[in-house]
Amino acid sequence: KNEVEQSPQNLTAQEGEFITINCSYSVGISALHWLQQHPGGGIVSLFMLSSGKKKHGRLIATINIQEKHSSLHITASHPRDSAVYICAVPGGGADGLTFGKGTHLIIQP
Amino acid sequence: DAGITQSPRHKVTETGTPVTLRCHQTENHRYMYWYRQDPGHGLRLIHYSYGVKDTDKGEVSDGYSVSRSKTEDFLLTLESATSSQTSVYFCAITRGGSTYEQYFGPGTRLTVT
Protein backbone atom coordinates (compact mmCIF):
# COMPACT_ATOMS: atom_id res chain seq x y z
CA LYS A 1 0.00 0.00 0.00
CA ASN A 2 1.27 3.45 -0.84
CA GLU A 3 1.94 5.58 2.21
CA VAL A 4 1.42 9.31 1.67
CA GLU A 5 2.93 11.83 4.04
CA GLN A 6 2.26 15.56 3.93
CA SER A 7 4.02 18.38 5.72
CA PRO A 8 3.36 20.59 7.43
CA GLN A 9 0.03 19.49 8.91
CA ASN A 10 -0.85 23.09 9.78
CA LEU A 11 0.50 26.34 8.38
CA THR A 12 -0.38 29.93 9.22
CA ALA A 13 1.15 32.68 7.12
CA GLN A 14 0.68 36.34 6.32
CA GLU A 15 -0.90 37.57 3.13
CA GLY A 16 1.67 37.85 0.36
CA GLU A 17 3.99 35.13 1.63
CA PHE A 18 5.29 32.29 -0.56
CA ILE A 19 3.82 28.99 0.61
CA THR A 20 5.22 25.49 0.15
CA ILE A 21 3.43 22.26 1.02
CA ASN A 22 5.26 18.96 0.67
CA CYS A 23 4.10 15.45 -0.16
CA SER A 24 6.09 12.22 -0.18
CA TYR A 25 4.94 8.73 -1.07
CA SER A 26 6.43 5.28 -0.71
CA VAL A 27 5.65 3.43 -3.96
CA GLY A 28 6.21 4.55 -7.55
CA ILE A 29 3.16 6.06 -9.22
CA SER A 30 1.78 7.05 -12.62
CA ALA A 31 0.35 10.38 -11.48
CA LEU A 32 -0.08 12.50 -8.37
CA HIS A 33 -3.07 14.65 -7.53
CA TRP A 34 -3.32 17.88 -5.55
CA LEU A 35 -6.76 18.73 -4.19
CA GLN A 36 -8.23 21.71 -2.34
CA GLN A 37 -11.01 21.67 0.24
CA HIS A 38 -12.45 24.87 1.71
CA PRO A 39 -13.99 24.74 5.21
CA GLY A 40 -17.31 22.94 5.04
CA GLY A 41 -16.89 22.66 1.33
CA GLY A 42 -16.39 20.20 -1.41
CA ILE A 43 -13.16 18.89 -2.87
CA VAL A 44 -11.70 20.41 -5.99
CA SER A 45 -8.93 18.99 -8.13
CA LEU A 46 -6.08 21.49 -8.55
CA PHE A 47 -3.46 19.48 -10.41
CA MET A 48 -2.73 16.05 -11.72
CA LEU A 49 0.90 15.55 -12.72
CA SER A 50 3.21 12.71 -13.61
CA SER A 51 6.44 14.63 -14.21
CA GLY A 52 8.00 18.08 -14.05
CA LYS A 53 5.96 21.10 -13.16
CA LYS A 54 2.50 22.54 -13.74
CA LYS A 55 1.30 26.10 -13.11
CA HIS A 56 -2.18 27.49 -12.76
CA GLY A 57 -2.40 31.12 -11.79
CA ARG A 58 -0.53 31.57 -8.51
CA LEU A 59 -0.32 27.83 -7.88
CA ILE A 60 2.63 25.72 -8.97
CA ALA A 61 3.00 21.97 -8.50
CA THR A 62 6.22 20.05 -8.99
CA ILE A 63 7.05 16.38 -8.81
CA ASN A 64 10.31 14.42 -8.59
CA ILE A 65 9.51 10.85 -9.54
CA GLN A 66 12.93 9.49 -8.54
CA GLU A 67 12.70 11.02 -5.07
CA LYS A 68 8.97 10.17 -4.71
CA HIS A 69 8.24 13.74 -3.68
CA SER A 70 5.96 16.55 -4.79
CA SER A 71 5.51 20.14 -3.70
CA LEU A 72 2.66 22.60 -4.03
CA HIS A 73 3.64 26.28 -4.03
CA ILE A 74 1.41 29.31 -3.69
CA THR A 75 2.88 32.65 -4.71
CA ALA A 76 1.56 35.97 -3.34
CA SER A 77 -0.75 34.13 -0.95
CA HIS A 78 -4.19 35.60 -0.21
CA PRO A 79 -6.75 34.92 2.55
CA ARG A 80 -8.98 33.18 -0.01
CA ASP A 81 -6.22 30.54 -0.35
CA SER A 82 -7.08 29.42 3.20
CA ALA A 83 -8.14 25.79 2.83
CA VAL A 84 -7.00 22.23 3.34
CA TYR A 85 -4.64 21.01 0.62
CA ILE A 86 -4.56 17.28 0.03
CA CYS A 87 -2.07 15.18 -1.87
CA ALA A 88 -3.27 11.88 -3.35
CA VAL A 89 -1.77 9.01 -5.34
CA PRO A 90 -3.26 5.96 -7.09
CA GLY A 91 -3.37 2.72 -5.14
CA GLY A 92 -6.86 2.22 -3.79
CA GLY A 93 -8.06 -0.37 -6.27
CA ALA A 94 -9.14 0.34 -9.89
CA ASP A 95 -7.07 3.47 -9.40
CA GLY A 96 -9.01 4.85 -6.51
CA LEU A 97 -6.84 7.30 -4.63
CA THR A 98 -4.82 7.02 -1.44
CA PHE A 99 -4.71 10.36 0.32
CA GLY A 100 -2.43 12.27 2.62
CA LYS A 101 -4.04 13.69 5.74
CA GLY A 102 -3.96 17.18 4.36
CA THR A 103 -2.31 20.50 5.18
CA HIS A 104 -4.53 23.07 6.87
CA LEU A 105 -3.46 26.47 5.54
CA ILE A 106 -4.56 29.78 7.01
CA ILE A 107 -3.55 33.05 5.34
CA GLN A 108 -4.00 36.05 7.60
CA PRO A 109 -4.65 39.52 6.14
CA ASP B 1 -19.09 21.56 -12.05
CA ALA B 2 -18.51 17.97 -13.16
CA GLY B 3 -22.18 17.04 -13.01
CA ILE B 4 -22.11 15.03 -9.80
CA THR B 5 -24.82 15.20 -7.18
CA GLN B 6 -25.18 13.37 -3.91
CA SER B 7 -28.32 12.77 -1.90
CA PRO B 8 -29.15 13.29 0.81
CA ARG B 9 -26.69 16.05 1.71
CA HIS B 10 -27.30 15.60 5.42
CA LYS B 11 -28.78 12.72 7.35
CA VAL B 12 -29.19 11.78 10.98
CA THR B 13 -30.12 8.20 11.68
CA GLU B 14 -30.22 5.79 14.57
CA THR B 15 -27.90 2.88 15.21
CA GLY B 16 -29.09 -0.29 13.55
CA THR B 17 -31.12 1.33 10.78
CA PRO B 18 -30.28 0.83 7.09
CA VAL B 19 -29.15 3.87 5.14
CA THR B 20 -28.62 4.38 1.41
CA LEU B 21 -26.63 7.23 -0.08
CA ARG B 22 -26.93 8.06 -3.75
CA CYS B 23 -24.37 9.42 -6.17
CA HIS B 24 -25.62 10.58 -9.55
CA GLN B 25 -23.49 11.73 -12.49
CA THR B 26 -24.40 13.21 -15.85
CA GLU B 27 -20.94 12.74 -17.41
CA ASN B 28 -21.29 9.10 -18.46
CA HIS B 29 -17.95 8.35 -16.75
CA ARG B 30 -17.10 4.70 -16.30
CA TYR B 31 -15.36 4.83 -12.92
CA MET B 32 -17.11 5.84 -9.69
CA TYR B 33 -15.85 5.79 -6.12
CA TRP B 34 -17.15 6.18 -2.59
CA TYR B 35 -14.80 7.70 0.01
CA ARG B 36 -15.30 8.62 3.63
CA GLN B 37 -13.54 11.52 5.34
CA ASP B 38 -12.77 11.46 9.04
CA PRO B 39 -10.60 13.69 11.25
CA GLY B 40 -7.19 12.15 11.75
CA HIS B 41 -7.66 9.68 8.89
CA GLY B 42 -8.29 11.84 5.88
CA LEU B 43 -10.12 10.36 2.93
CA ARG B 44 -10.32 6.60 2.51
CA LEU B 45 -11.74 4.46 -0.27
CA ILE B 46 -14.81 2.39 0.64
CA HIS B 47 -15.91 0.83 -2.67
CA TYR B 48 -15.47 1.51 -6.34
CA SER B 49 -17.15 0.65 -9.63
CA TYR B 50 -15.60 0.24 -13.07
CA GLY B 51 -18.87 -0.25 -14.94
CA VAL B 52 -22.51 -1.24 -14.62
CA LYS B 53 -22.76 -4.14 -12.17
CA ASP B 54 -18.96 -4.14 -11.77
CA THR B 55 -17.96 -3.18 -8.24
CA ASP B 56 -15.25 -4.06 -5.76
CA LYS B 57 -14.08 -3.34 -2.23
CA GLY B 58 -11.75 -0.61 -1.13
CA GLU B 59 -9.72 -0.06 2.00
CA VAL B 60 -12.59 0.32 4.49
CA SER B 61 -15.47 -1.69 3.04
CA ASP B 62 -16.67 -3.56 6.16
CA GLY B 63 -20.29 -2.69 6.93
CA TYR B 64 -20.93 -1.20 3.48
CA SER B 65 -22.35 -2.53 0.22
CA VAL B 66 -22.76 -0.86 -3.16
CA SER B 67 -24.75 -1.26 -6.32
CA ARG B 68 -24.57 0.17 -9.80
CA SER B 69 -27.46 -0.78 -12.05
CA LYS B 70 -27.08 2.25 -14.33
CA THR B 71 -24.01 4.15 -15.50
CA GLU B 72 -25.20 7.34 -13.83
CA ASP B 73 -26.02 6.01 -10.35
CA PHE B 74 -23.79 4.50 -7.68
CA LEU B 75 -25.50 3.63 -4.39
CA LEU B 76 -23.78 3.11 -1.04
CA THR B 77 -25.73 1.17 1.59
CA LEU B 78 -25.03 0.85 5.27
CA GLU B 79 -26.91 -2.33 6.10
CA SER B 80 -27.10 -1.59 9.82
CA ALA B 81 -25.61 1.79 10.69
CA THR B 82 -23.18 2.10 13.60
CA SER B 83 -21.78 5.17 15.31
CA SER B 84 -18.37 4.46 13.76
CA GLN B 85 -19.94 5.16 10.39
CA THR B 86 -20.62 8.77 11.33
CA SER B 87 -18.61 10.56 8.67
CA VAL B 88 -18.69 12.71 5.58
CA TYR B 89 -19.10 10.62 2.46
CA PHE B 90 -17.82 11.75 -0.93
CA CYS B 91 -18.52 10.26 -4.29
CA ALA B 92 -16.01 10.74 -7.11
CA ILE B 93 -15.92 9.97 -10.81
CA THR B 94 -13.23 9.71 -13.43
CA ARG B 95 -13.17 8.97 -17.11
CA GLY B 96 -10.39 6.43 -16.74
CA GLY B 97 -7.92 5.38 -14.08
CA SER B 98 -5.42 7.31 -12.04
CA THR B 99 -4.05 9.29 -14.98
CA TYR B 100 -7.36 11.10 -15.31
CA GLU B 101 -8.64 13.86 -13.07
CA GLN B 102 -11.11 12.80 -10.37
CA TYR B 103 -14.18 14.94 -9.82
CA PHE B 104 -15.82 14.93 -6.42
CA GLY B 105 -19.43 15.32 -5.40
CA PRO B 106 -20.47 17.83 -2.70
CA GLY B 107 -20.49 15.24 0.08
CA THR B 108 -23.07 13.75 2.44
CA ARG B 109 -22.75 14.37 6.17
CA LEU B 110 -24.08 11.30 7.99
CA THR B 111 -24.58 11.19 11.74
CA VAL B 112 -25.46 7.90 13.42
CA THR B 113 -26.81 8.36 16.95
Image (cartoon, coloured by chain):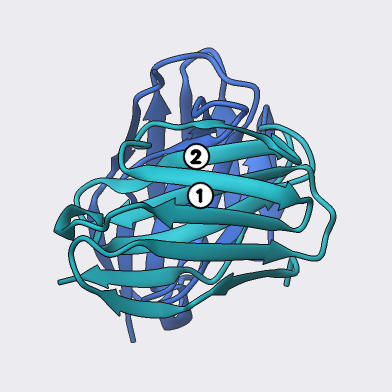
Chain colours: A blue, B cyan
Do residues under tags 1 and 2 come within 8 Å of each other at their CB atoms? yes
- Determine the residue positioned at 20% across, 71% down: B14
Crowding near pointer 1: few (<14 within 10 Å), some, many (20+)?
A: many
Task: Out of B37 and A4, give the one closest to the viewer.
Answer: B37
Name the quarter where the C terminus of chain A is drawn.
bottom left
Q: Identify whether B11 is placed above or below A13.
A: below
Task: Out of A77 and B73, give the one closest to the viewer.
Answer: B73
Residue A60 image position (x, y, % from top left): 60, 51
Residue B73 image position (x, y, % from top left): 69, 58
Q: Amino acid at mark 2?
A: His
Residue B55 image position (x, y, % from top left): 61, 34
Residue identified by numbered label 2: B47
Residue identified by numbered label 1: B34
Q: Identify whether B41 is placed above or below B108.
A: above
Q: Which mark is residue A52?
A: none
Task: Out of B5 and B15, give the one closest to the viewer.
Answer: B15
Label 1 to label 2: alpha-carbon separation: 5 Å
Specify which label sits upstream in the sequence, 1 or 2: 1
Image-based side of A18 in relation to B97, left or right: left
Name the quarter where the N terminus of chain A is drawn.
top left
Image-based side of B3 in relation to B8, left or right: right
**Count of numbered circles in the view:** 2
Q: Amino acid at mark 1?
A: Trp
- Determine the residue positioned at 53% across, 14% down: A28
**Chain identity of mark 1:** B
Residue B19 image position (x, y, % from top left): 39, 64
**Chain identity of mark 2:** B
Corner quadrant of residue B100? top right
Label 2 residue SS: strand
Task: Out of A68 and B12, give the one closest to the viewer.
Answer: B12
Label 1 residue SS: strand
